[in-house]
Image (cartoon, grey):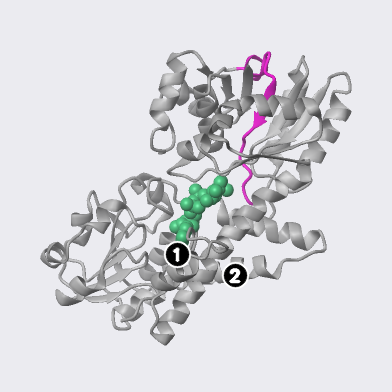
Amino acid sequence: MRIAIIGGGYVGLVSGACFAEFGVEVAVYEADPTKRQMLLEGQIPIYEPGLDKLVAGNAAAGRLTFPVKLQDAIERAEAIFIAVGTPTRRGDGHADLTYVFAAVEQVLKVLDHPAVIVTKSTVPVGTGRKILEMVRELRPDLAVEVASNPEFLREGSAITDFMRPDRVVVGAESDRAREVLRQLYRPLYLLETPIVFTGLETAELIKYAANGFLAMKITFINEMADLCEKVGADVNDVARGIGLDGRIGKKFLHAGPGFGGSCFPKDTLALMRIAEEAGAPSRLVQSVVAVNDARKEGLAARVVAACGGDVQHKVIAVLGLAFKPETDDMRESPALPLIRGLVSRGARIQAFDPEAIQTARPLLPESVVLTESSAEALTGADALVLITEWNEFRVLAPARLKELMRGNVVVDFRNVYDPAPLRAAGFSYASIGRPE
Ligand code: UGA
């Protein structure tokens, strides 16, 4: 089987490499010449554990190619995946579909055989139907089907998520489209992965509903954490105590600084707009968006409070910049409002992240010093603020902190440290939703 993937970004590259690993012939078309050149030379423009090896291995085996021309990429392809970006449109919070429709139009111009066009990018409900209209209008001569196959990959564990998903969702309205997708995901049948076949609109909504629900779960436990702080309860135990109820589930109940990343903030905002425009506004989703934004904006004030009400001229070591560990992605990272807030209050920032230094640099105020190690960031610091839970930060011992820092404040936005040893070593330790 042969397929094409339009867009060599995160989703396109991971899906392409994984389908190739399944034994499918995959052509990934990347329109940006610089990015394409990097891919051709075996350089992966993003940090995702295992992706470089998977791409290199499948490229060497000839199953994964990066054609220069779109026409060559879609030649003989039975399925053509659209995996281009859908950023938030300025002004109204909707997903910007310019790239999606442009990609479909270009494909339709040069397509010379029947195929299934599959949306893999997260697209608003109704997009598949619009693509179907484009097909009927531009290529009434060809049997082109449309399907929606949303992805549920997490950055940092994208390959495992693709290879061992909880489920695959396929929105399609013809037997042929369903059959092509069924064939593609065949290797997952051995793992007994359920495939949920639905209509186009339903598949599109499942993606938003899944992200909306997970974002709501995180926001709920974050609010419970604030309540815990007021009443002297421990949010980690609350999460465990409710999560063991199978109806609630343990995952995504880790209280923290608020969610970030390229998906939850964008998708909750888009879902909010979709629901409003459809005449069924979701007050829950509206609240999730507002509560999470406010939480991230309030992070600096929490640090100021932990530092005794003032951070003017204080040196603050910020550990972690990426929105979560195992990625260099800074999009909507809570570290950004945190650092901006601290700098505007006169603090001096020394920050370190194992992967995100380069992506973070242009997004941060110039006065922020980016260091090459956590030890360097901690040297001479009045306070340590942990914002991304990389494993290497978890193992920093209180004795080592004492050695490096000049102050004794630790603010742990991810609840990774054990309070007792830190307090025993003389640190003033603040975390999220745990008793003082
Ligand atoms: C998320 C979803 O988990 C994926 O299923 C989905 O495919 C993807 O969005 C997408 O739509 O493409 P991702 O953004 O990579 O994946 O990262 P997550 O691991 O879900 O984390 C998102 C944010 O929530 C991070 O800021 C993380 O720190 C935060 N989070 C997560 C918490 O604060 N607490 C938790 O318990 C879990």
* 143 displayed left or right of 167: right
Q: Is residue 261 visible?
A: no
Q: Position of residue 216 (x, y in %)?
A: 58, 64
Residue sitting nearer the eye, 336 or 264: 264
Please give the residue where the numbered disc 2 appears in the rendered image: 290
In this rendering, the label closer to the viewer, 2 or 1: 2
Residue sitting nearer the eye, 432 or 175: 175
Give the magenta part as a residue range.
69-91
Q: Position of residue 133 (x, y in %)?
A: 85, 35
* Residue at point 33%, 83% (across, down): 309
Q: Amino acid at mark 1?
A: Pro
Task: Decide whether residue 72 is among the magenta residues.
Answer: yes
* Residue at point 56%, 71% (across, down): 291
Q: Secondary structure at mark 2?
A: helix
Which corner quadrant holds the C terminus? bottom left
Any atom of ligand 1 within 8 Å of the CB at mark 1?
A: no
* Residue at point 42%, 71% (across, down): 299
* Residue at point 50%, 27% (across, down): 17
* Image quadrant assignment for residue 108: top right
Residue sitting nearer the eye, 71 or 288: 288
Residue 279 vs 29, above or below: the answer is: below
Residue 264 vs 201, above or below: the answer is: below
Task: Decide whether residue 139 is among the magenta residues.
Answer: no
Residue sitting nearer the eye, 226 or 198: 198
Please give the residue where the numbered disc 1 appears in the rendered image: 337
